[in-house]
Image (cartoon, rainbow, N blue to C red):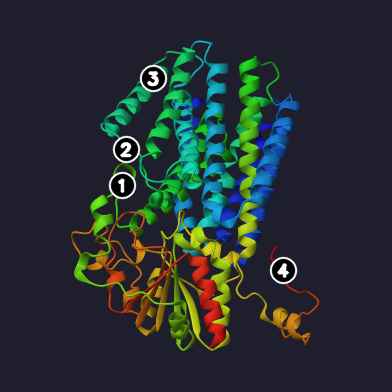
Amino acid sequence: MSHGLLLSFEVTILVLAIFLGFELISRVPTLLHTPLMSGTNAIHGIVIVGAMLVAGLGHKDTLTTVVGLVAVVLASANVVGGFVVTDRMLEMFKKRESPAAERAAQDGGATDDGDPSKPEVPPT
Amino acid sequence: MGQVATNFAYLATIVAFILALKFLSSPATARRGNWIGAVGMLIAIGVTFAQKSVVSYWEILVGMAVGGSFGAVAARRVKMTAMPQMVALFNGVGGGAAALIALAEFHNIAPAPGRLHGDISVSIILSALIGSVSFAGSLVAFAKLQELIQGRPIVYAGQQVVNGLLLAAIVAAGIAIVAGSEKQWLIWAVILGSLLFGVLFVLPIGGADMPVVISLLNAFTGIAAAATGFELENNVLIVSGMLVGASGTLLTILMGRAMNRSIANVLFGAFGQVSPSAAAAAADSNGGAVRSATADDVAVMLAYAHKVVFVPGYGMAVAQAQHDVRQLADLLEARGVEVSYAIHPVAGRMPGHMNVLLAEANVPYPQLKEMDEANSEFPRTDVALVIGANDVTNPDARTNQGSPIYGMPILNVDEAQSVVVLKRSMNPGFAGIENPLFVNPKTVMLFGDAKESIDQLIAGVKAQ
């Protein structure tokens, strides 16, 4: 494939991605804007692919080795930190902190959430 | 792994990321979406390991171990109140990685004359420039939010001129590269200049404007990642980067709209400089008198209300009062009081900041009301309890054309039967703007640390 043709395909998917991005993000409620930020943070951690391609080169000089290594460190921190912190946040969003389980803890009575075998995990 | 198989595997990653964003449309599915995104990322990493050109593994594995463990520990330890700076930090490292990839690419492919296509060199410069600005800018934002440096705008004479000249110089170096010069110092000049620009660009932006800045830097890192995709001719980077770029851009626009200010005004207006006249005049302006109440008075008001709306702001985050607020809400609910929370889009230091804090305190999310919904409820609210929020409740935004925030959509707390404002002192808020809400006859002030005041209210309500 000629270089120009490849470029035209790349620009096409870029433009489609912009429209798709706006469509997807406009459906995210303001309630979840912080997880959205940290979630998209994790997604741009995809630069780790580029960092790996640089760091994984066979014959490279010192500069490339150092730069590649640092890029992998930064991108890995981005990926792992982004997904972990987003998971921590989303875990907290609950409709109701099972009032049944709370009552059960208080008076040892029966729960009414239909599934007493699965008590709500207390937040840590 | 062949190129075709690789591209199809990367497509799986792209689909996973799209699903992750799609599932964020509801809190019920959002967490699953995040996991799908993480799986997509693992696929991309696995596929990249199988690339023919990737032959040296130890650098990658060492780098991943170091970076990954730092990210994991930081993400597990961070307090929810410190989330804005954490997001800024993770955002910055992504931008830094994009800039470094650009540096290595240019370093490796530039020496052979004629090998650099115009679009490749443009991509290299864009990812070096935007990635570096995002890296340095995010670190400054981090330092401001962490209070390592002062949050107020840092301004000096000729600031815009200096920034403009610096940017022009960076662009000139970039154009030289695109025009065919393959001198190594040019790419260094672009990167170092952009790092400096990133610092200078965020320094004059005040803490209250951080929601806009963080969103914008988020967009920058996404765009830098997409540019890296063009550089490496890699679809997954182009699409994922641009999804993030679109997300950050949209959030930036939403935040600007929620403050009724143009993005240019936020970035270059140095909003929130110390305004001594406003600070001095705050208490005695408008001719009104401030009524201060005791915690017991307020506890009685709350205990015998039908409907109470909490209006949290950055002050609640600073005092870490979210758990106490929830306790108070529980007590009131147990007495039959209807409780909800009114969340302004720019309350706090990042988009959705208050929602995360209250979710941490186990507030059920259906009680968290967006601005429009909350405003429709204030007229039938008995008590609006403002906790460390200021400018987002300022009625001047509706009525006083001379006010710097005139036109900004606000929470109409003054439409409630009565208003209680929890505040440290009469000092004006971050932006140094007077708030006539405080001298409204409906309003009583409860001075003190938000957490201590809420604890006193809890004791007071229990005594009823």
**Element under disc 3:** helix
Name the residue tied to disc 1.
Answer: B273
Task: Please state which of the two labelled residues, at mark 3 or mark 1, is closer to the viewer.
Answer: 1
Name the residue tied to disc 2.
Answer: B155
Label 3 – label 1 distance at C-alpha: 34 Å
Name the residue tied to disc 3.
Answer: B173
Label 2 – label 3 distance at C-alpha: 27 Å
**Element under disc 4:** loop
Q: What chain letter is assigned to the residue under label 2?
A: B
Q: Pointer 2: residues within 10 angstroms few (<14), some, or many (20+)?
A: some
Q: Are marks 2 and 1 on the same chain?
A: yes
Q: Nearer the viewer, residue B216 or B337?
A: B337
Amino acid type for the residue under numbered disc 3: Ala
Percent across and percent down for residue B94 are: 56, 38
- Residue A29 appears in the figure: no
Name the residue tied to disc 4.
Answer: A122
Q: Is residue A46 left or right of residue B429?
A: right
Residues at circles 2 and 1 in contact by the CB criterion of under 8 Å? yes
Q: Pointer 1: residues within 10 angstroms few (<14), some, or many (20+)?
A: some
Answer above or below: position of B31 versus B305. above
Label 3 – label 4 distance at C-alpha: 56 Å
